[in-house]
Image (tube, grey):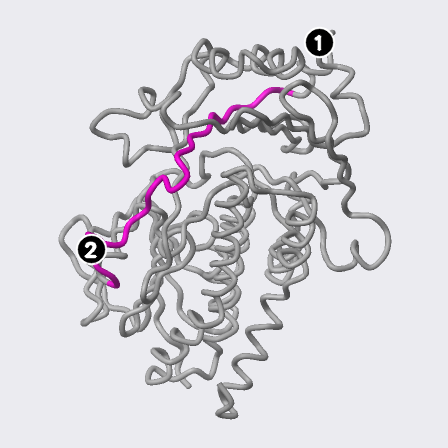
Amino acid sequence: MAPLNIAIIGAGIGGPAAAIGLARNGHKVTLYERSTKTSEVGYAFRITPNSERCLKSLDVDTVVGGAVVATSGCLMNAEGRVVREINENLEGAGARRGTSVFAYRPQLHQQLMDVAAKAGVEMKIGTKVESIDADKSQLVLEDGSSVSADIIIAADGVHSVVRSQIVDTTQRFPTASTGHNAFRFMVPKSVAQNDGIMKSIINSSARFVSWSGHNRRILAYPVDYDRQFNITCTHPQELSDKETSGDDAAAVSYNQSASLQTVLNIYKDFPPPAIRLLQLADPNGFRVWKLVDMDEIPTWSRNNTVLLGDACHPVLAFGFSGASMAIEDAVTLAELLTSDVGLGDVPGRLKLYEEIRKPRVGMVRDTGRKIARGEESSVIMGNYMQVLGEHDAVGYAREALARSREGKV
């Protein structure tokens, strides 16, 4: 079969990951990114064992790139009392299944882009896709020109411009389903280690710490070769909505500034170490992130155009799986769009991708909402982390494709 011409819109995390796998299958892959920056700005996230294995299948080693292995964690309530301790990546079967790490988004993004370039992916950085025509399988660029492709993969995020070509976006769109916002910021580890209040916590065996209560949560963990702490502080959205108001709030809901005083007011009842962590941050470094997700949409594809990641299933950060789900999507598509796939096979393969991914994404979405509503427990979290971490997205996709070829799906 002749290689297919595949256009991927969006060079966040899922887009480059899909590009690597598809290019290695022999397809001609072009990656379009509206930003002129080649290294994505952002904070950090957790990579659970399921997606860490996916990245390794793409020859991306997150630890080599600066990610920090998660080992032990200390979960405290809003009064500072320890309610649970967590140990991960221990020796034995659990460790062999994969590694749980904390990744700094710009570093992982650069790793993916570097591997994609080596795989032969053509990069169109600073090229904005204004719209697409799913019937003609064409992209319309900002300069008015059009580009044809055999397959269009939209990895263009929560504010996807392609989603409206797949579903009715007047009825299907992301919402703040649980009513939470989050502050995000970084603190150099050296600053925390030299602080009299924080050093006892920072120098303990715990690799990540959290305080939660009163529908508020502070989570801190190390990234960037263990040089910085990434901190996320969730809270009821009405407490910081004024920080996300404005004409452009929807477009930049992840990058609105917040004042130190606003942050301190919201968490004023938390214990001294938590408050001190907030005070150690750059007062100009706080950003507000409106936490949104989306109910399941009827379909992820139309003809030869398909959605990936947040474009079709944004999930809440409480389930720490937004990036992981996009990575799983990416390797699934790569396993289904094999080197011998014909153009006539593509719509069926895209439907198979949807059938494979929808139940799993639904589980993550529902669990994230439960955690946000305070319905978590050690049993719920234990079961969730096991189901999440043990999944083999590559193997599962291969088995599904084999069954499909045998007519057993």
The amino acid type of the residue labelled 2 equals Ser
Q: Residue at x 33, y 53 (%)?
A: 32
For this rendering, which residue is in front, 366 or 65?
Answer: 366
Q: Position of residue 150 (x, y in %)?
A: 30, 73
For this rendering, which residue is in front, 384 or 224?
Answer: 384
Determine whether 225 is above or below 5 in the image: above
Dominant SS of magenta comes to: loop
For this rendering, which residue is in front, 75 or 87?
Answer: 75
Which image quarter: residue 92? bottom right
Q: Position of residue 66 (x, y in %)?
A: 65, 38
Q: Position of residue 348 (x, y in %)?
A: 37, 80
Mark 2 packing: few (<14 Cα in 10 Å), some, or many (20+)? some
Determine whether 75 is above or below 192 in the image: below
Q: Which mark is residue 100?
A: none
Q: Residue at x 45, y 34 (%)?
A: 41
Task: Give the mark nearer the N terminus: 1 vs 2.
Answer: 2
On the rendered structure, is 231 left or right of 18?
Answer: right
Q: Position of residue 276 (x, y in %)?
A: 62, 11
Q: Are marks 1 and 2 in contact (CB under 8 Å)?
A: no
Residue, disc 1: 195
Residue, disc 2: 131
Looking at the rendered structure, the number of numbered marks drawn on it comes to: 2
Q: Residue at x 47, y 59 (%)?
A: 362
The amino acid type of the residue labelled 1 equals Asp
Mark 1 packing: few (<14 Cα in 10 Å), some, or many (20+)? some
Q: Secondary structure at mark 2?
A: strand
* Segment tinted magenta in the rendering: 166-188
Judge depth for marks 1 and 2 and give the one in front.
1
